[in-house]
Image (tube, grey):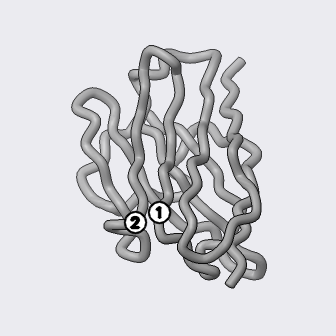
Amino acid sequence: QVQLVESGGGLVQAGDSLRVSCAASGYTFSSYAVGWFRQAPGKEREFVAGINRGDGSTWYADSVKGRFTIIRDNAKNTVYLQMYSLKPEDTAVYYCAASRTYYSSTYWRVDGMDYWGKGTLVTVSS
């Protein structure tokens, strides 16, 4: 059974840093691309960052480029999202998702992902 479990969310202040984790089990982790998405209250779920299978190439939404870093550790079946210089507009539930697709752009569709975690809440106060 495939499982993705997010952790590490919490309440931080603007300008702070935070790392969220996505632990995977039940499938060959290294064969899947993994993406982080987020959903703020009243808004659609949006792509934040992704890391490919194989070459580990990374993609970022313009809104987080230069502030967020996605890292995968295949030995631990875990993908991390390191977030710096957090802003109140980063407040959302953060989800990780896995896909067999190899991505060549930032166009990571929500409905293109094969597996999803249940999310972890990140709240950034001003």
Q: Which residue is mark 2?
A: 67
Q: Residue at the location (63% across, 16% down)?
A: 26
Q: Residue at x 48, y 47 (%)?
A: 35
Dot 2 amino acid type: Arg
Task: Name the amino acid, label 1.
Answer: Tyr
Q: Is residue 83 left or right of residue 89?
A: left
44 relative position to 72: left or right: right
* Circles 1, 2 touching at the beta carbon (< 8 Å): yes
Q: Secondary structure at mark 1?
A: loop
Structural distance between the alpha carbons of marks 1 and 2 = 5 Å
Report whether 100 appears left or right of 14.
left
Which is more N-terminal, label 2 or label 1? 2
Image location of residue 84, percent across then percent down? 47, 63
Element marked by disc 2 = loop
Tell me where residue 109 appears, x and y as whole percent: 48, 59
Q: Quadrant of the N terminus?
A: top right
- Using the image, determine if residue 16 lies above or below residue 116: below
Query: Circle 1 is placed at which residue position?
Result: 84
The one of 108 and 70 positioned closer to us in this rendering: 70
